Image (spheres, rainbow, N blue to C red):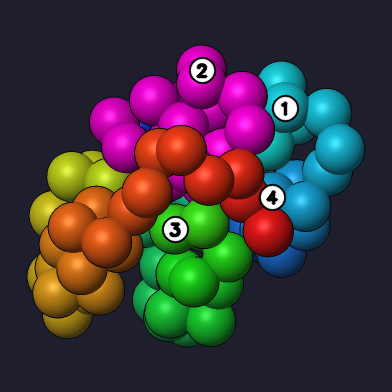
Amino acid sequence: KSLNSDAMYPYFDLFSAMLDDPNSYIRTRGILLIAANAKWDIDYKIYEIIDSLLKHITDDKPITARQCIKSLPIIAKYKPDLTDDICNALKTANPRTSRS
């Protein structure tokens, strides 16, 4: 639904809360849903949670880290002001450290 309409955007805060879930599947879903709703983010909510999202570049679970990295171009496409933050996070990411 998020690809074609803003019907899921009202749940953005719920998606953001998913980033801190102990279950990696839930974290991954949150990341993907945030990215899918970037185009509808008229309230600039991504700007408030971008640091929390970018921490998942080095998530403890490799699949979550991969999905996070894969979602970043989508976010950058719709929020070009965040491109520098995203690039810096990727450049400084140390994959040998766990998320904190």
Disc 1 to disc 3: CB gap under 8 Å: no
| Type of the residue with mark 3 | Leu
Q: Where is residue 41 in the image (x, y as percent from the top left)?
A: 41, 67
CA–CA distance in space, label 1 to label 3: 15 Å
Q: With respect to residue 26, does 12 lie above or below?
A: below
According to the picture, the residue beneath numbered tag 4 turns out to be 19
- The range drawn in magenta is 56-71
User: Could you tell me the amino acid type at mark 1?
Assistant: Ser
Residue located beneath label 2 in the image: 63
Q: Where is residue 27 in the image (x, y as percent from the top left)?
A: 68, 37
Circles 2 and 1 in contact, beta carbons < 8 Å: yes
Give whichever of discs 3 and 4 has the lower sequence position: 4
> Which label sits in the foreground, 3 or 4?
3
- Which residue bears the numbered disc 3? 54
Work out whether residue 6 or residue 55 is closer to the camera in this orientation and state it: 55
Q: Is residue 83 magenta-colored? A: no
- Residue positioned 43% across, 79% down in the render: 47
**Residue at the limit of the structure toward the right, as seen here:** 22
